[in-house]
Amino acid sequence: MSAEPASRPLPRPSPLTQGYWDAVRQHTLVIQRCLDCLVYRHYPRPLCPGCGGGRWEWSPVSGRGVIYTFTVTHLPFHPAWQGRTPYAVVTVELDEGVRMVGELRPEDTQRVAIGLPVEVEFRDLPGENVTLPAFRLR
C-alpha cells in the first residue's frame, strides 16, 4: 500500500494579504496600487515604498509579463514535491512593472528561459479550498 502524498505548504493570509487571496480564489490577479501616487506594489505592504502613502486599493492586473529570472529545482525541498521534480520557479516582471514569484507549469519547465512571455493561470488545490497563481508560457 502506498503512503498518502504529503500536503504542500499553504499560504496563510493575513489581514493585509486577505484581499489578494480572495481575488486569486476567484481566478483574478490583483496587485496593491497606491491611491496617492498610483504606483503598483507587490508584495503587499501597508505603506507605499514610493511616496510613503498609506492609502491603497486592490487593482486587477493583466497577469501577463516576461520571465525576469528562474531556477529549476531537481531535488524536492518538501515531501509534497517528491516525484514532481524537476520544476521551475520563475520571477515574472508583470506588464504593470512589478515582479512576482510563482511556479511555472510542469510542461513548460524544459523550455524556460529569461525573457520569455508568460501569463498567469490559477490552480485550485483539491481538498484544500485554496487557489494558487502559477505561470505558463504564452
Image: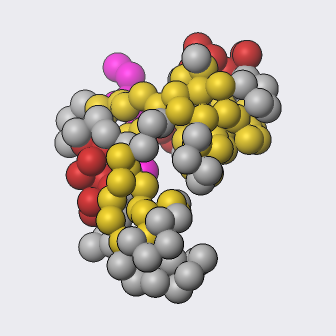
Residue farthest to the right, as pictured: 114
Residue 46 magenta-drawn? Answer: no
Q: Tell me: 97 left or right of 73.
A: left
Q: Residue at x 52, y 28 (%)?
A: 119
Q: Nearer the viewer, residue 109 or 52?
A: 52
Q: How many marks?
A: 0
Q: Nearer the viewer, residue 128 or 116?
A: 116
Which image quarter is the N terminus in? top left
Residue 28 percent location from the top left of the image: 31, 39
Q: How is the image coloured?
A: secondary structure
Residue 94 percent location from the top left of the image: 58, 42
Q: Read off the magenta span.
A: 1-9
Which image quarter is the C terminus in? top right
Q: Residue at x 74, y 41 (%)?
A: 68
Q: Nearer the viewer, residue 20 or 71?
A: 20
The quarter of the picture where residue 92 lies is: top right
Q: Residue at x 60, y 76 (%)?
A: 50
State whether residue 88 appears in this view. yes
Residue farthest to the front, as pictured: 37
Residue 8 percent location from the top left of the image: 42, 44
State whether residue 44 is above or below residue 136.
below
Q: Residue at x 33, y 59 (%)?
A: 58
The quarter of the picture where residue 103 lies is: top right
Q: Nearer the viewer, residue 72 or 28?
A: 28
Residue 132 percent location from the top left of the image: 38, 40
Q: Tell me: 45 left or right of 122.
A: right
Q: Tell me: 124 left or right of 80.
A: left
Magenta stretch secondary structure, dominant: loop
State whether residue 1 is above or below residue 50.
above
State whether residue 82 appears in this view. no
